[in-house]
Structure formats: C-alpha cells, structure tokens
Amino acid sequence: MSAADTPRSGTQWGRIDLHAHSTESDGTESPRELVLQAHAAGIGTVAITDHDTTAGWADAADAAREVGIGLVPGVEFSSQQQWASVHVLGYLLDPAAPAFLTERERIRVERVERAQRMVERIGADYPLTWAIVQDHAAPGATIGRPHIADALVSLGIVADRSAAFDGILHWRGGYYQPHRAPAPTEAVRIIRAAGGVPVIAHPAARGQATMDERVIAQLVDAGLMGLEVEHRDNPPEAQEWLRRQARIHGLITTGSSDWHGRGKPNLFGEHTTSAEALDAIVEAATGAEPILPA
Ligand code: AMP
Ligand code: FE
Ligand code: FE
Ligand code: ZN
C-alpha cells in the first residue's frame, strides 16, 4: 500500500459486519440485495464472503457505491482437517492469484461431485433428483448442502433448511458425504499468498471441534491473522478462550452475523466487528481495496 492510500485509520466505518453470503453460494439473496439489506439494517460496512467464490464482488461493489456503505470483498474458503470442515475467511485478497484460483476451482468441482453423491443416496429413499437441486442454485453458484435442503423443502419432505440439516443432511443423517479440500494451514497460506487476511470462521462451531491450542499455533505459523470470535455458533465460554488465544498470538478478533438471507435465522448486525479490527485488516491486506463508506 502506498503512503498516499493511508491513513485509513479513522475511517468512519459505521457498524461493521464482516460475514455474509449471497446467491453466488448458499445465501438466498443476490449480492446487490445483500448490500441493500445490510444498509437497511443499519450496517455501515459489510463484507461479502461467499463460499469458494468471489463472483459477487462486482455487483456488491456497485450497490455499495450506490447506497454509500462500505464494502469489504472477501471469501469463505473451505478446508478440511481430518473429518472436520474448517472455514477460513479471506479478506481483501487478489481473486486472480494463481494458487487461490486453482484451489478454489478444485473445491467447487469437488463440491458438485460430493453433492451429486449425496443426492444419489437420498434419491434411493426420497423422490429427489440432481435436476431439482440444480433448480435451487443460481447459475455458477458454489454448490452446498443448503441447495439440497431447498430442493427437499420444495418437495415437501422437510419444512425448512434447518429441519433438513437436523435430519437428512446431518453428518450423521445417513446420507452425508464429505468433500475434499486443502488443509486449514494450506488455506491460510493460499489467502496470504493472494495478499489477503485469513481469519478462522466460527472456530468453536460444532464442525470445528478440532480447534485446540496446538492447531491454532500451527495456523499462526502458517500465517493466520485473525479469529472470528463473536458468532452465534461459538458458545460463550469458547469465545472467552478464543479471545485469550488471540491475545497470546497477537491475532485480530472479529464478530459477524454469517447472514444467508432467508436461508438462516442469522440477522445483520447480531454481532459486529470493531473499527480497530477492520483498520488492522485493511492495513495488512495487499490483494484488494475496500470500498469506503460515503
Ligand atoms: P456444506 O458446505 O455443503 O457442507 O454446507 C454447509 C453450509 O450449510 C454452511 O456453510 C452453512 O451456511 C449452511 N448451514 C449449516 N447448517 C444450517 C442450518 N441449520 N440451516 C441453514 N443453513 C445451514
Ligand atoms: Fe454457508
Ligand atoms: Fe462457515
Ligand atoms: Zn459463512
């Protein structure tokens, strides 16, 4: 970053929410609508962090400039630690960085094949087909279990996404299939190599029970820069522990909603990030620029 770009410190970001999904992955609203709804909810700066894609950045940026809120372009990168799926948020990375491009494409293909395997298994017991699932995903979207959930809802098999995740789509539901993804340390390195700022998403959520002191130390060695502490899936005691880990390793801490539109009950602003934390993220990033609030 050149001297002319700084100082950003002191930017009036407003209320900051750094984790939200659009129809480019498993959210129910377009990138533009994501920004409009964040604005309507009183958010001053929002991040778009779709799973394994940056395709929503341009439309989100147009909408952010239109309504005058800040936008932090990001991604929620899939990784796999033994049996557990670990999500790594990457902020302000260069979406064209070669290692990121290659791995991102690989994961997206793996996700389709894995969803097809799950649909095949579910289809043995329910009238579900791959074509119905595709009807519930926007063209080019990163495919995930939520799209299968929406198909099951449309068939009247479950009431909503949550019911699908509690039963048929649960990892112990009898139909679950994992998808391959890089190790979390590799995901962190890829985001750093793209000039981005890696932050472990909801580190204490059930699927990420492998997160312990040793794993965090390894991730820090790989270049980890932050932990998403305030998130509805991190139990309060775990948040305290995560804050201690952040102090020990000098990590940034964030808080966010993980908004998915109508796909999840998570509401914009239910958790927020401090201006100091966002200043530190912007300061550290070299891959992309945020859009500043008007
Ligand atoms: P996948 O990445 O395909 O394994 O699907 C996991 C995604 O499903 C996560 O990123 C969540 O956003 C979403 N998800 C998990 N649990 C629920 C739920 N109970 N209701 C709606 N979406 C969920
Ligand atoms: Fe999601
Ligand atoms: Fe996640
Ligand atoms: Zn998310």
Image (tube, grey):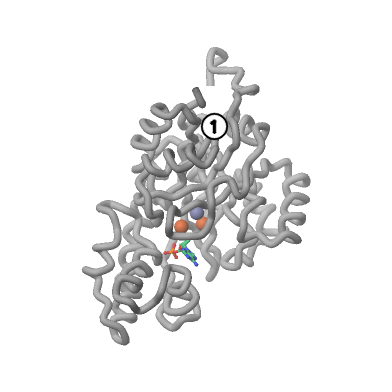
In the drawing, does residue 214 fall left or right of residue 114?
A: right
In the drawing, does residue 84 fall left or right of residue 220?
A: left
Residue 121: where, in percent of width, then height? 33, 81
Q: Residues within 10 Å of mark 1 (few under 14, many from 20)?
A: many
Number of callouts: 1
On screen, 150 above or below 78?
A: below
Residue 248: where, in percent of width, then height? 78, 46
| Label 1: element kind | loop
Residue that lies at the very extreme toward the bottom in this rendered image = 125
Residue 195: where, in percent of width, then height? 50, 35
Residue that lies at the very extreme toward the front in this rendered image = 40
* Residue 236 appears in view: yes
- Which of the 4 image quadrants contains residue 212? bottom right
Residue that lies at the very extreme toward the left in this rendered image = 131
- Residue at 25 percent across and 63 percent down: it is 134
On screen, 129 above or below 288?
A: below
* Residue 221 appears in view: no
- Residue at 50 percent across and 80 percent down: it is 172
Residue 164: where, in percent of width, then height? 43, 74
Disc 1 marks a residue whose amino acid type is Ala
- Residue at 59 percent across and 22 percent down: it is 8
On screen, 154 above or below 142?
A: below
In this view, the residue in front, 81 or 134, is 134
Whether ligand 4 has any atom under 8 Å from the Cβ at mark 1 is answered as: no
In this view, the residue in front, 52 or 28, is 28
Q: Which residue is label 1 attached to?
A: 285
